[in-house]
Amino acid sequence: MSTPAANPLPKARILVVEDEPDIRESFCAILESEGLRTQGAGSLTEARLALDSFRPALVLLDLGLPDGTGLELLREIKSGDRANATEVVVITAETKIEVAVTAMREDAFDYLEKPIGLDRLLTTTRNCLERLALEQSNRNLREQAIERWSLIGESPAMCELRRQMERVAAAEIPVLITGENGTGKELVARGLHLRSPRFSQPFVATNCAAVPETLIEAEFFGHVQGAFTGADQARAGLFLEAGAGTLFLDEIGEMPLGLQARLLRVLQERVVSPVGSSEERQIQCRIVTATNKELEEEIQGSGFREDLYYRIRGVELRVPPLRERGDDVTRLARHFLEKHGELRAAGSPALRLGKDAPSFLLAQSWPGNVRQLESLMRAASLLVDEDELGAAELEPLMHPSTGQAAGEGSNDARWFAIEDLKEFRDRVEKEFLRRKLDEENWNVSATARRIGIRRTNLHDRLKHHGLK
């Protein structure tokens, strides 16, 4: 902390609580010379008043004060609403080190032993402020991530879902997320992770239906080098890659029965054995699963293990379909128009919902749910020339077979304005795949069968186009 510019928190506020005026004033002068703001307090009473009015980032706290022990103030700070915003460094006499040890157990950042050297004072202050800055940065990143992955909607069903998420996030109990395709089950899983104590650890998501059966064990549990043809390097597998974070297993109802048995053992014993090895490795991640199937019906039809069902279903969170969310459809539509505004042609005004758009949107059944609505708003942003999106513009986009034939409308000109053949093919294929997925309720297997390609090839194309 040689110059004010090097200070991790310029103008950070430091409260110096010290009953000896000469020491207190000396500390304040040194810290102010480093570009920091200070205030002094000679007693517990003065310090409590300063905490409210001065709101310091750091308190240098002498433990021996005329009206009580500094430990009292330390406990008040660490149990109050400023616990995350204020650090405490305790100051103690050489003969009272045991009291400083007690303070460290009470969550003090560090302690300074009298007499205090200049370098020690500045180094400790710098380290403390750097940690505060890092913690604040992490909190900001977490809040931004929560906002990015937030669930939009104020319908009673969504308010209840958010309430349940807040209750469940911090618990270690397994969570099964259920709901139709396109309702936002992965958003719920990410929301749980970001609100949990594991938020700074990895979030690893996989679609159980997307992994080829021949590679599924290696994908989940890892493999050693040479375990099978093509295994040129060892791989940890999803359970270990998730570390102490969250592993999200989407479409768990599509998991083969053989793998279900192995998954049950992993959940029971919290260990995995890589393919090609007998070594067992501990796992630390939380498991969150999701399905669009009625697993109890799958159990009756011998398609899903009952013991695994009760293992993963510690708590079930149901994500409501869009048709049950009332006016949320309008809120979401406006959000998606803003999100995809960049697709508008250069110089085009922002696209907004017309007066008859809400009633049109509310009248739809939305088999593809929120994903289908986003797809519709994305297409509208790209293809509609007007600045107002009403029922007349939505109808042909929603039901292409009843709209204008290709080549008959002005929207076609947008496509043929593309000069590059590869870009044209890419954009046509992307729109084709999106519409077929919408028509099949975003069931990848059904869509692959319908358009006549292998499911793995379809997954490759979806990845290429950024479609999820």
Image (cartoon, rainbow, N blue to C red):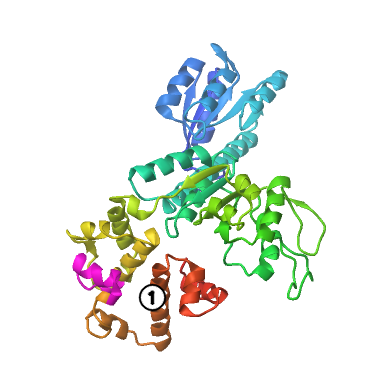
Residue at x-position 52% and y-position 40%: 168
The kind of residue tagged 1 is Glu
Residue at the extreme front of the image, as rendered: 300
Please say if 299 is above or below 167: below
Q: Give the prevailing secondary structure in the magenta stretch.
A: helix
Left-right relation of 374 to 103: left
Residue at the extreme right of the image, as rendered: 278
**Which quarter of the rendering shows the N terminus?**
top right
Q: Position of residue 45 (x, y in %)?
A: 47, 15
The one nearer the camera, 349 or 70, is: 349
* Residue 193 highlighted magenta (yes or no): no
Left-right relation of 385 to 192: left
The one nearer the camera, 177 or 377, is: 177
Q: Give the extent of the magenta segment.
A: 382-401
Q: Secondary structure at mark 1?
A: helix
Please say if 273 is above or below 129: below
Residue at x-position 33% and y-position 50%: 325
